[in-house]
Amino acid sequence: MSEFDNKNTFEIEHKILTRGDAEFTAMNHMSASYGQLGIRSSFVLNGGGLFAMPAFFAAILQKSEILMVMDSIVLSGGVFILGIFCAALSCGVAYVNYQLAGDGALLGANSELYGFWKRNGNKGNFDLRDFYAKKQEYNDLKAKNFMKWAKYTARGGLLLAIMSYLFFIGGAVAAGYTLLSIADH
């Protein structure tokens, strides 16, 4: 292979990788934005439910009625707190997920670079192709492990976010049942 061919091959590989990386990065940014919006919404919903519920009950109920349903009110508040807790855990898991995915992508890029050097690694009296082949194999394995854990943390973060919304619904339903139980008396 001539020097011209090596240069063209490298430029073509670089263009392909750059275009793919740009599209991948754009999609990840959009996904991250929607995820952040969802988690913020969950915090607002659960926090709003937790703080609005006591004021609402205090405004519409007599003191004797509040004491009668205090256990239900505390249960509703506890469910909202669980929603806030799940939203906070989801944020932490999302942070770990992005770190793992970023590290995996960096290792993958390094691995591709080692692959390029492996193909063009004969430098004077030294044949470095075996060295770069081993480095590429090692980085490929590490990148796969990072990406595997990134998938697990992505699923865990999504599950926690969904649970946070379910706890909001549960807290709202529990507060509704509290109102209905007062209306029955």
Image (spheres, rainbow, N blue to C red):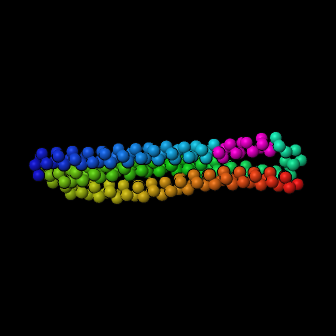
Of 43 and 178, the residue lying toward us: 178
- Residue 119 position, x and y percent, is 19, 54
Q: Which residues are magenta?
A: 45-58
- Residue 106 position, x and y percent, is 35, 48
Asked whether residue 71 is in view, the answer is no
Q: Residue at x 70, y 52 (%)?
A: 171
- Residue 171 lies left or right of residue 96; in this view the side is right
- Residue 43 position, x and y percent, is 62, 44
Q: Residue at x 82, y 55 (%)?
A: 181
Residue 121 located within the stretch drawn in magenta: no
Q: How many marks?
A: 0
Asked whether residue 80 is in view, the answer is yes
Give the answer, above or below, for where 50 lies relative to 140.
above
Residue 46 located within the stretch drawn in magenta: yes
**Predominant SS of the magenta segment:** helix
Q: Residue at x 58, y 43 (%)?
A: 40
- Residue 78 position, x and y percent, is 71, 51
Q: Residue at x 67, y 44 (%)?
A: 47
The C terminus - image quarter: bottom right
Among the 4 quarters of the image, the one containing residue 132: bottom left
- Residue 132 lies left or right of residue 1; in this view the side is right
- Residue 86 lies left or right of residue 108; in this view the side is right
